[in-house]
Image (cartoon, rainbow, N blue to C red):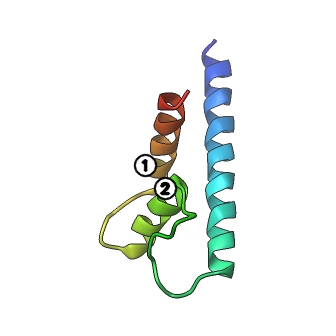
Amino acid sequence: MTSSLQRLHEETDQMLEDIINERRASRVEKKTGENKIEAGDDLLDVLLNLQDDGNFKVKTDSIKSIILLASNLSS
């Protein structure tokens, strides 16, 4: 049981890491130089803006946790 939970954790962690990295890459392509919230931004965009801004120390693991929590609350 423990090994299957560990595997599930690793797969979920990697999936979230991939999603975050893909979003970062797409944000770099269209970056205007300002970290401001726009009408089309979702939770991940807002969290990445906070991380990029530097005023808040938001780690990627914290972003993953917030996404998981938000997805459980919206279910």
- Residue 45: numbered disc: none
Quarter of the image with the C terminus in it: top right
Residue type at tag 2: Thr
Per the model, the C-alpha gap separating discs 1 and 2 is: 5 Å
* Mark 2 Cα-neighbour bin, 10 Å: few <14, some 14–19, many ≥20: some
When the figure is inspected, residue 65 is found, relative to residue 39, above or below; the finding is above
Tell me which corner region of the image, top left, top right, bottom left or bottom right, holds residue 59. Answer: bottom left
Instruction: Determine which residue is flagged by label 2.
Output: 60
Picture mark count: 2
Q: Nearer the viewer, residue 12 or 34?
A: 34
Q: Residue furthest left?
A: 55
Residue type at tag 1: Ser
When the figure is inspected, residue 2 is found, relative to residue 56, above or below; the finding is above
Dot 2 falls on a residue whose secondary structure is helix
The residue at the point 51 percent across, 43 percent down is 67
Residue 63 placement (x, y as % from top left): 47, 51
Q: Residue furthest front?
A: 39
The residue at the point 47 percent across, 84 percent down is 34
Residue 15 placement (x, y as % from top left): 68, 44
The residue at the point 35 percent across, 73 percent down is 54
Tell me which corner region of the image, top left, top right, bottom left or bottom right, holds residue 29. Answer: bottom right
Q: Nearer the viewer, residue 51 or 45?
A: 45
Q: Residue furthest bottom?
A: 33
The residue at the point 69 percent across, 53 percent down is 18
Q: Is there CB contact under 8 Å for labels 1 and 2?
A: yes
Quarter of the image with the N terminus in it: top right
Dot 1 falls on a residue whose secondary structure is helix
When the figure is inspected, residue 55 is found, relative to residue 59, above or below; the finding is below
Residue 10 placement (x, y as % from top left): 64, 36
Instruction: Determine which residue is flagged by label 1.
Output: 62
* Mark 1 Cα-neighbour bin, 10 Å: few <14, some 14–19, many ≥20: few
Q: Residue furthest top?
A: 1
